[in-house]
Amino acid sequence: MNYTYEPAFKESIRFHGHACLGLAVGYAAARVALKRLAIARAEDEELVAIVECDACGIDAIQSVLGCTLGKGNLIYRDHGKNVFTVIDRRKNRGVRIALTADLFKRTPEQEALMLRVFGGEANETERQTFWTAQQRKIGDFLADSAETHFRIEMIKPEAPEHARLFASLICEQCGEQVMEPRVRLRAGKKVCIPCAENYGRGW
């Protein structure tokens, strides 16, 4: 099946660095959120995305929905699952989108080829074979109905609090700036976490 990449997916690819099936999963989830919540990309913190893995798809969530770590409206939970919960603070509603399809199953041969490509050991023919197959998988996946691959549930969420701004202090050990709530006291000095954990005879 042929699939022409939408501009928003092309932007996600530009942001992420390459097209891959993992990125497409996050992009498809972001599209579901936009449609089900009738929302547009977040300019500030009006949307919150809670993601349950640190995989490629998170870059599409950031690119499409405008939920980022820097704005404080991207929350990471280390569950190892392609699950995305998107919350609209203004209407206090959300959608939970969970991948249920086994998209990443590979034969031993496919696994070996992938390792060769990403390990820089593949020749040009092998690279072309790998990326052509990837493009086909991405196109077929994005052309399918989201319900084919995801469990989608509308939820009544408890929206996390807005990101807070804190004063900054200077670590008395390394001289670097650190936000006040992350300062630790060691041997009477106000220090950052790395310096506090590097406890030695010099204190």
Image (cartoon, rainbow, N blue to C red):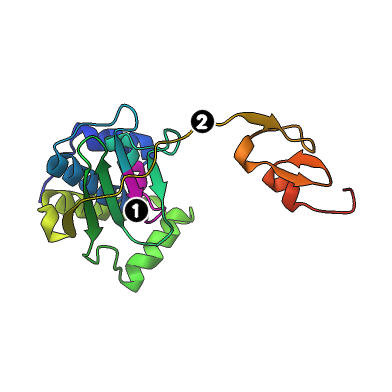
Q: Is label 1 in a helix, a strand or a loop?
A: helix
* Label at residue 171: none
On the picture, is 50 further left or further right than 133? right
Q: Residue at 39% across / 41% down in the picture?
A: 161
Q: Residues within 10 Å of mark 2 (few under 14, many from 20)?
A: few
Q: Does the magenta stretch include residue 15?
A: no
Q: Name the residue under label 2.
A: 165
Which stretch appears magenta? 49-60
Q: Is 57 contained in the magenta span?
A: yes
Mark 2, secondary structure of its residue: loop
Task: Residue at 56%, 31% (x, y): give it.
Answer: 166
Q: Position of residue 65 (x, y in %)?
A: 28, 36
- Residue 4 percent coordinates (x, y): 14, 39
State whether residue 146 is above or below residue 163. below
Give x and y (percent) for residue 201: 90, 53
Callouts 1 and 2 close, C-beta under 8 Å: no
Image quadrant assignment for residue 195: top right
Residue type at the position of mark 1? Thr
